[in-house]
């Protein structure tokens, strides 16, 4: 009982953080039905996490874990990556399509909000202190991905 309440409470800030104004693209295409490229959104108010399993751990060099992410018409790829706690992580995010509203990456838990210029690798660095999942998303909180920390 207590635990589920905690879960609900923990989820609230995500909704609160979502800007009230959705991007035009989303407003027009909120149905998501015919719209394959937005399937990664999940389209639910549950802040649905991508369901795919974490990819294998990235190559770690001197403790630095470098993870390459791309933004494609499907969203962030891979949508779930696995890293180790206690070692610095460097996400290198490259947006490869203009057919997305994910023109920035927002890691709400870390207070990170970085523009993603087209075809330009953008580095996001942090050191996860404990295991869990870190969620990131586009500015509208529609397209999202996870970093699984172990
Ligand atoms: Cu969006």
Image: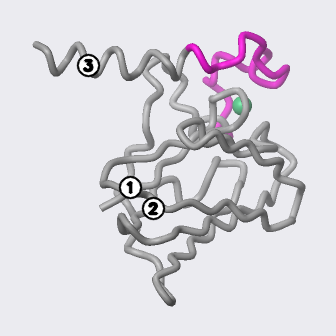
Residue 6, label in figure: 3
Tell me if label 1 and label 2 are in contact, CB under 8 Å. yes
Q: Nearest the camera: 99 or 92? A: 92
* Foreground: disc 3 or disc 1: 3
Report x, y in % for residue 44.
49, 20
User: Which residue is depicted at the point 86% across and 65% down?
Assistant: 120
Residue 123, label in figure: none
Report x, y in % for residue 84.
36, 68
Mark 1 sits on what residue? 148
Q: Is residue 30 magenta?
A: yes
User: Which residue is depicted at the point 63% across and 64% down?
Assistant: 69
Mark 2 sits on what residue? 81
Q: Quadrant of residue 93?
A: bottom right
In the displayed structure, would residue 74 be above or below residue 5?
below
131 relative to 41 in the view: left or right = left
Whichever of labels 3 and 1 marks the residue nearer the N terminus, that label is 3
User: Which residue is depicted at the point 19% across and 18% down?
Assistant: 4
**Mark 2: is the Cβ under 8 angstroms from ligand 1?**
no
Q: Quadrant of ligand 1?
A: top right
* Foreground: disc 2 or disc 3: 3
User: Which residue is depicted at the point 56% across and 60% down?
Assistant: 126
Query: Mark 3 to mark 1: distance in Å?
Result: 20 Å
Q: In the image as oriented, which residue stretches furthest toward the bottom?
A: 62
Structural crowding at the residue carrying mark 3, measured as other residues with C-alpha within 10 Å and reported as few (<14), some (14–19) or many (≥20): few
Secondary structure at numbered mark 1:
strand
Tell me if label 3 and label 1 are in contact, CB under 8 Å. no
Q: What range of the chain is rendered magenta?
A: 16-37
């Amino acid at each position: 009982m207590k635990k589920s309440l905690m879960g609900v409470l923990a989820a609230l800030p995500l909704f609160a953080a979502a800007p009230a104004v959705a991007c035009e693209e989303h407003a027009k295409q909120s149905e998501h039905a015919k719209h394959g490229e937005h399937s990664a959104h999940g389209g639910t108010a549950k802040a649905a996490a991508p369901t795919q399993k974490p990819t294998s751990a990235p190559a770690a060099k001197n403790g630095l874990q470098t993870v390459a992410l791309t933004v494609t018409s499907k969203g962030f790829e891979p949508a779930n990556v696995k890293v180790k706690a206690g070692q610095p992580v460097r996400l290198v995010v490259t947006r490869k399509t203009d057919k997305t509203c994910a023109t920035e990456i927002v890691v709400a838990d870390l207070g990170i909000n970085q523009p993603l210029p087209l075809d330009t690798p953008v580095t996001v660095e942090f050191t996860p202190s404990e295991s869990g999942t870190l969620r990131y998303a586009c500015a509208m909180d529609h397209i999202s991905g996870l970093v699984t920390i172990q």
